[in-house]
């Protein structure tokens, strides 16, 4: 009996230490204000980051007619469906009560790099901080400064409608341990400046992989099939493979020039035009420079060809 009691105490102590260690390791991370040296923001670059980042696509106040959406009014409210429930894009206007008007610069950087709110809660990765963590610090600071120039929009979006246990934010700490890793983009010195710019825009602010990749049962991107297409995150259809395996096969035979042009006007090599969620992306990419669109196309066409999950067969 004493031996059993001793064993039970050892097991209990080990469990307590393990839980305490897990608790410490999964505390939501934050970027301290001391990590931000003096800086003068570049508002023009902030607007570029705003456009390539697709901020208006999720956070602008919804309207049944997409052409009537005011891209500058970021009051949120858009419903984002997922297998885990429905997310509602929050208000990120400079409103001090309902938006991010009281956020500090460090709060903003923390949200985009670490997926942590000013209150220390985990943010859901429906907000693509897994890609935004690749953004350069100055680009984040420029974006924050630009957002502060936009109109104040009162009103908070409704709470997320999520199933248990996905409504427990603390569990996201474990998710982050598994899937939130990396840091700001580091240029490849063996590549051209154009390629590096494209790689940065695609993998960082543009967060292209967030839609153009299949996901596992926990909602994380399947790295081995990155950019290879798959079911749309909201379950509304199929997102195409944008590696050369997809772009150079099928009905459309894309060239690098075709892709750069598509990001400007949505026109495909077949003569058709982008629709659905991609039409909204074009509203963003049409506002960045021609050089940036060319850089994105240049990088995309250097991706390794990957055969992703097969799309559903078209009905006759």
Image (cartoon, helix red, strand yellow):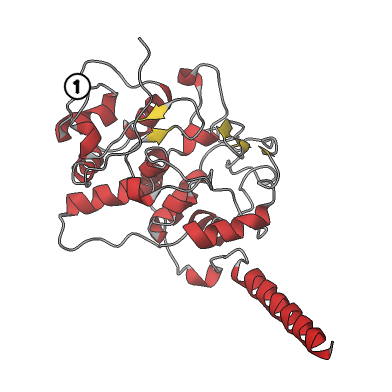
Residue that extends furthest to the right in the rendered view of this protein: 1
Question: Does residue 217 sit above or below 1 in this rendering?
Answer: above
Question: Does residue 299 sit above or below 156 in this rendering?
Answer: below
Query: Could you tell me which residue is drawn at 25 percent across and 40 percent down?
Result: 243
Residue 105 at least partly seen: no
Residue that extends furthest to the bottom in the rendered view of this protein: 2
Q: Which residue is mark 1?
A: 269
**Structural crowding at the residue carrying mark 1, measured as other residues with C-alpha within 10 Å and reported as few (<14), some (14–19) or many (≥20):** some
The quadrant of the picture occupied by the C terminus is: top left
Query: Could you tell me which residue is drawn at 35 percent across and 21 percent down?
Result: 313
Of 54 and 182, the residue lying toward us: 182
> In the picture provided, is 311 more to the left or to the right than 30?
left
Across and down, in percent, residue 295 comes to 21, 44
Query: Could you tell me which residue is drawn at 51 percent across and 31 percent down?
Result: 234
Across and down, in percent, residue 161 comes to 68, 36
Q: Which quarter of the picture shows residue 293?
A: top left
Residue that extends furthest to the front in the rendered view of this protein: 1
Across and down, in percent, residue 278 comes to 38, 28
> What is the secondary structure assignment of the residue under circle 1?
loop
Number of marks in picture: 1
Q: Which quarter of the picture shows residue 186?
A: bottom left
Residue 240 at least partly seen: yes
The quadrant of the picture occupied by the N terminus is: bottom right
């Amino acid at each position: 009996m004493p031996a059993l009691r001793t064993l039970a105490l050892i097991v209990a102590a080990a469990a307590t230490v393990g839980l305490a260690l897990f608790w410490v390791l999964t505390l939501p991370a934050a970027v301290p204000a001391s990590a931000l040296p003096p800086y003068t923001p570049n508002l023009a670059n902030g607007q570029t980051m705003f456009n390539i980042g697709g901020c208006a696509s999720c956070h602008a106040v919804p309207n049944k007619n997409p052409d009537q959406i005011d891209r500058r009014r970021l009051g949120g409210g858009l419903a984002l469906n997922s297998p885990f429930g429905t997310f509602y894009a929050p208000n990120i206007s400079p409103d001090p009560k309902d938006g991010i008007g009281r956020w500090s610069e460090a709060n903003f950087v923390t949200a985009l790099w670490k997926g942590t709110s000013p209150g220390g809660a985990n943010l859901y990765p429906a907000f693509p901080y897994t890609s935004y963590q690749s953004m350069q610090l100055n680009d984040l600071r420029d974006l924050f400064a630009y957002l502060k120039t936009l109109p104040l929009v009162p009103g908070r979006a409704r709470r997320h409608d999520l199933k248990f246990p996905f409504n427990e934010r603390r569990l996201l700490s474990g998710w982050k341990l598994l899937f939130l890793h990396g840091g700001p983009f580091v240029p490849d010195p063996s590549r051209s400046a154009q390629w590096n710019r494209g790689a940065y825009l695609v993998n960082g602010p543009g967060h292209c992989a967030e839609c153009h990749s299949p996901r596992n049962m926990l909602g994380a991107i399947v790295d081995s099939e990155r950019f290879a297409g798959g079911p749309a995150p909201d379950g509304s259809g199929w997102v195409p493979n944008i590696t050369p395996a997809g772009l150079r096969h099928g009905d459309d035979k894309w060239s690098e020039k075709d892709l750069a042009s598509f990001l400007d006007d949505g026109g495909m090599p077949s003569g058709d035009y982008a629709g659905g969620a991609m039409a909204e992306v074009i509203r963003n990419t049409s506002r960045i420079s021609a050089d940036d669109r060319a850089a994105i196309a240049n990088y995309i066409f250097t991706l390794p060809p990957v055969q992703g999950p097969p799309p559903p067969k078209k009905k006759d």
